[in-house]
Image: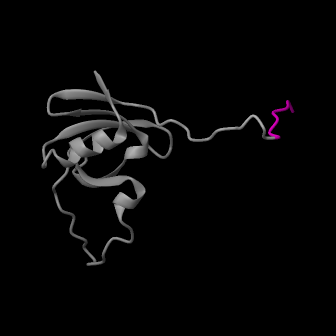
Amino acid sequence: MQTINRNKAKELIKESKGLIFSATFTKKDGVNRLIQARTGKKYKSKTGKKQAYKPEEYNLIPLYDMKKKAFRTLNFNTLLTLSINKKKYLIEEKKSSFKISKKSNFKISKI
């Protein structure tokens, strides 16, 4: 299984042109979920309202869940694995950008 970053995974999904793929991700409640989905299917609102936000600004991609037959949004920040075009990929962990300098007064103490 090849390891790729989240940007490469996003590219692969966008380039799939509607082909079915599967992905494992962590839901908001902390449960890992496997989804079989595809892009390219357009959602039509029953009320005619436009979407209140742009998914790409939040690192999300709208897609169609093939098992549940409903539209869902995939969060790339919680993506774990991707299977597309008969290839399986492991998504590399996002590295934390938080650093503590040696000069800071930050101390850890037991409570």
Q: Is residue 67 visible?
A: no
- Residue numbers of the magenta segment: 105-111
Query: Could you tell me which residue is drawn at 15 percent across and 44 percent down?
Result: 16
Question: Residue 40 falls in which quadrant of the image?
Answer: bottom left
Left or right, 94 with respect to 16, comes to right
Q: Is residue 2 visible?
A: yes
Query: Could you tell me which residue is drawn at 29 percent across and 40 percent down?
Result: 9
Query: Could you tell me which residue is drawn at 12 percent across and 49 percent down?
Result: 17
68 versus 101 height, above or below: below
Q: Residue 18 at x, y = what percent? A: 13, 49
What number of labels is visible?
0
98 versus 39 height, above or below: above
Q: Is residue 110 magenta?
A: yes
Query: Could you tell me which residue is drawn at 25 percent across and 73 percent down?
Result: 46
Question: Residue 97 falls in which quadrant of the image?
Answer: top right
Q: Residue 3 at x, y = what percent? A: 33, 27
**Residue farthest to the top, as pictured:** 1
